Amino acid sequence: MHRRHFIAAALASLTVPALAQVPADVPLDKAERQAVLRGLADSLEQSFVFPEVGARYAAMLRAKADNDAYAALTDPTTFGEKVTADLQAVSADGHLRLAPEAAFRTRTPRPQPADMPVSAKPNGPQGLEETKMIGDVAYLRFNGFFGEDKVVDAARRFLLDNAGTARAVIIDARPHRGGGLAEMDAILPLLYAQPTVLVRMDTRASAFADGAPNPPSLVAREAPATIIRQDHTVTPDKGETRLQSVPVYYLTSRRSASAAEHLALSFKRTKRATLIGEKTYGAGHFGGVEAIGKRFAAFIPVGRTYDPETDWGWEGQGVTPDIATGADEALAKALELASKAGAHPA
């Protein structure tokens, strides 16, 4: 099965190859609707993180295909939205989605509520929006972890360049919609003084013919044959240790999702950072985007991330901050705490 896999993948759209087999403005017909529904059913049955839920999704989709239940829907976008809503009615999932493949080829986030806090809206380039020193506090603001080498390198380089003067670190994930592990793996070794297990990730084995991705930070653990189990770990940087003892503050909003929540739980359970802001979105099943039919794609959740000590994951719940504030007040609160801890914000 062809799949592009993104560990802890984002709610924001992710890049997939253009299918370009059917123009976007050509109305759907019965044959295409049925092909998409049956193809999606097969994928979910084989790969969805929980086999019993995947089977329920598949049964619903096949029944809809047999009855041409979406006969009135000829617009691809509307069709995708309705199928997604029906899947969510069977079992809610923060990532599962069907849409025309063009919706996944850009990183344009889904529309947000009108009352979304200003601080939770992206206002800079994709990925690392901003780095700056606020007095002697190192501040990084992310709207996603997209794994682009230049962005990963820039985040790490900023911390390295300021390790001698920074007395605290603030990571702002209020506009963060998800992504992968690369940014985390680049900066966390500068912040942790001891080898540490962050979180555990279980992937449905049938989703990958050749096994799940295995970067060095993922350590394989024993598990049933149906599951690929890995611990996300951090190994401290031995060459630069000055930030490994400074206070770290992690800012969240109700927009913060997926990989942002992965990092939130990692920080919270290891007590390495103080979480400040709002409870996060609640999308804890990672996966990837798969082509469905000739012009559709679906985000297929294939695994779950959780606390290995308690088995708790944030899907449908979100991660609760240590200090609850409105999202727009979170940075001021972090700077206040940094000042009390001995930093000198400007």
Image: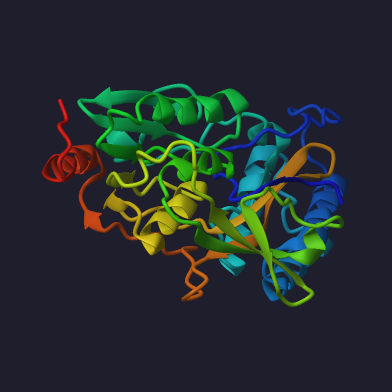
Residue extending farthest to the front is: 239
- The colour style of the image is rainbow
Camera-side residue of 161 and 185: 161
Residue 182: x, y in percent?
58, 40
Residue 165: x, y in percent?
27, 28
Camera-side residue of 335 and 261: 335
Camera-side residue of 108 and 25: 108
Residue 18: x, y in percent?
78, 29
Question: Which quadrant of the structure image shows residue 12?
Answer: top right
Say above or below: 61 vs 33.
Answer: below
Residue 175: x, y in percent?
39, 37
Taking the spot 48% from the left edge, 75% from the top edge, the residue there is 309
Camera-side residue of 201 and 47: 201
Looking at the image, how many numbered discs can be counted on the residues?
A: 0
Does residue 196 appear left or right of residue 85 in this picture? Answer: left
Question: Which quadrant of the structure image shows residue 152?
Answer: top right
Taking the spot 81% from the left edge, 64% from the top edge, the residue there is 206
Does residue 238 appear left or right of residue 75 in this picture? Answer: left
Q: Would residue 65 be seen by someone viewing this image from the given angle? A: no
Taking the spot 35% from the left edge, 38% from the top edge, the residue there is 242
Say above or below: 62 vs 183.
Answer: below
Taking the spot 58% from the left edge, 61% from the top edge, the residue there is 88
